Image: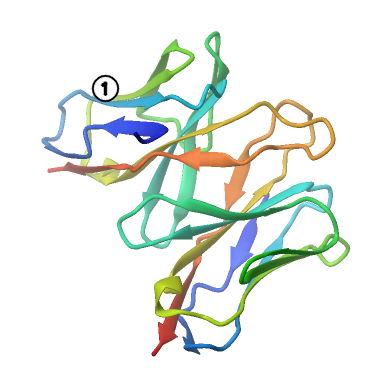
Amino acid sequence: DADVTQTPRNRITKTGKRIMLECSQTKGHDRMYWYRQDPGLGLRLIYYSFDVKDINKGEISDGYSVSRQAQAKFSLSLESAIPNQTALYFCATSDFPDNLRGMNEQFFGPGTRLTVL
Amino acid sequence: QKEVEQNSGPLSVPEGAIASLNCTYSDRVSQSFFWYRQYSGKSPELIMSIYSNGDKEDGRFTAQLNKASQYVSLLIRDSQPSDSATYLCAVNMEHVFGNEKLTFGTGTRLTIIP
């Protein structure tokens, strides 16, 4: 079974609709992240959470909100979807940083392809 | 603005040759560096991490880090058609321990020619 799962894998919706993307992980990591990927722009961080009670805005949080329901679950919402939110969305997880090495590796889910018409 | 720069390519390399991918970053204090491989339409897959100056080898892959010059590179020896993908460089440029997060380059598209 995959360590990081995302649902749905594909979604087509209309402008103005509310959309929720879900992420679950079995890796036991405290840290979870939401990214979007657009052609030519690379991966950009939307929101991240270092534990259940911690939520932080990333580089491009406008138009998005998140909820950390449990250590293993982190969901991303688009309250009123617009066409320029059409993108590939990835969830990722990582362990707490190592004292000697610093940041630990991030592991990605399979992604959700979202199209807003 | 903290940045990670990669040549977008495409980089074409004959099968069996060495592919060399380069990445530069803007923050001199960065400590953690990662290379991800991403096939079209798929999620990024971690292939190398490096934290200290010098070379780190793992199978056909070698990561090279030079903090003084602020660049990190990835060498792929004996390139195979299955290595054709986009390679993403990622750097942690946060200075506060416990607040780490990654900044990604836009990726280099690599094509291995049979």
Q: Where does the image place residue B30, in percent across and percent down from the top left?
A: 78, 48
Where is A94 relative to A36, above or below?
Answer: above
Q: Which residue is at a point 47% across and 49% down the rendered structure image?
A: A43
Q: Is residue A82 left or right of residue B102?
A: left
Quadrant where the C terminus of chain B lies?
bottom left
Where is B7 relative to B54, above or below?
Answer: below
Q: Quadrant of residue A108?
A: top left
Q: Which residue is mark 1?
A: A79
Structure colour scheme: rainbow
Q: Which residue is at a point 35% across and 29% down the rendered structure image?
A: A63
A113 or A56: nearer the eye?
A113
Q: Is residue A85 left or right of residue B50?
A: left
- Dot 1: element: loop
Which chain's residue wears label 1?
A: A
Q: Is residue A17 left or right of residue A55?
A: left
B12 or A4: nearer the eye?
A4
Q: Which residue is at a point 56% across and 82% down the rendered structure image?
A: B78
Q: Where does the image place residue B59, in percent across and percent down from the top left?
A: 63, 67
B23 or A86: nearer the eye?
B23
Disc 1 residue type? Glu
Q: Looking at the image, which residue sits at the far right?
A: B68
Q: Where does the image place residue A101, in percent across and percent down from the top left?
A: 80, 40
- Estimate how packed mark 1 is, as few (under 14), some (14 to 19) or many (20 or more) residues with alpha carbons within 10 Å: some
Q: Where does the image place residue A20, in percent across and percent down from the top left?
A: 25, 24
Where is A20 relative to B111, above or below?
Answer: above
Q: Quadrant of residue A105?
A: top right
Q: Which residue is at a point 11% across and 35% down the rendered structure image?
A: A14
